[in-house]
Image: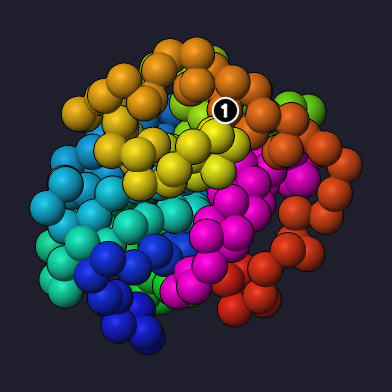
Amino acid sequence: MSKIPILPDQYYHIYNCGVNYRKIFFTPANWQFFIVRLRKYFDSEHADIISYCLMPNHYHLLIHAKSTDFSSKIMQPLGTSYTKAIIKQENQIGALFQGPFQAGLILQDSYLLHLSRYIHLNPVVAGFVRKPEDWEYSSYREYSGFRNGTLPKPVIILSQFMTGSRTEILAGVPERRGSTFSDDMLKDAQRKYSEFVNEKCDPWAEFPESLLMD
């Protein structure tokens, strides 16, 4: 379990890596299986995924916790299920992950925005792709309009690029969309977010080191 308590109605950067930074994904099916597990365990009662990125030897999740049993209901079964499957596949002995998942509490809305960019730029910085939309295993395609997926819930981030009251905007999320959250507003916010992510900057520089992966 995480060293810090996961409290309801708070946002966290959740991450973990393979033992000695070794790979945790070995085949294309492994990446898809992990995403299927995310869909299974992240339910609206306990937590939402705001953004995510899977990398060959680690993962990042930006989440909104909704209950006190986030660790026991989501992260423990997620980690156990995936570990058992990979150990069986690879005929390994021992642990897959470096240790318990790590968590950093996010205290400001601006950190949410910059952390989402940091997460989405991981494969670009690592040299796996030239553009974040070229990486299949992240939520950037939903943020930028390239994919109409339902796993990430990006409105809290995209709303920072929309005009109007934050309360009114968030009241128009797709699950209960109202007139304040139009398709045009969404497309405009996606375009502005893409420009924000792709502008020349140091994505590591805009938030505390405590939120970065160790």
In percent of the image, x 42 and y 66: which residue is there? 12
Residue at the far right in the pictured view: 200
Q: Quadrant of residue 129?
A: top right
Q: Position of residue 59 (x, y in %)?
A: 49, 53
**Rendered view: 131 above or below 85:** above
Q: Camera-side residue: 90 or 8?
A: 8
The kind of secondary structure element at disc 1 is helix
Total numbered circles: 1
Q: Left or right: where does residue 73 sit relative to residue 93?
A: left
Range of residues picked out in magenta: 105-127
Q: Quadrant of residue 206?
A: bottom right
Tell me, yes or no, whether the highlighted magenta stretch contains residue 122: yes
Look at mark 1 in the image and give the residue it sits on.
189
Q: Quadrant of the N terminus?
A: bottom left
User: With respect to residue 91, does 6 lie above or below?
Assistant: below
Residue in view at x 29 percent, y 75 percent: 6
Callout 1 environment at 10 Å: few (<14), some (14 to 19), or many (20+)? Answer: many
Q: 212 or 194, which lies in front?
A: 194
**Residue at left offset 13%, top offset 62%:** 73
Residue 6 in the image: above or below residue 138? below
Q: Amino acid at mark 1?
A: Ala
Q: Is residue 110 above or below residue 138?
A: below
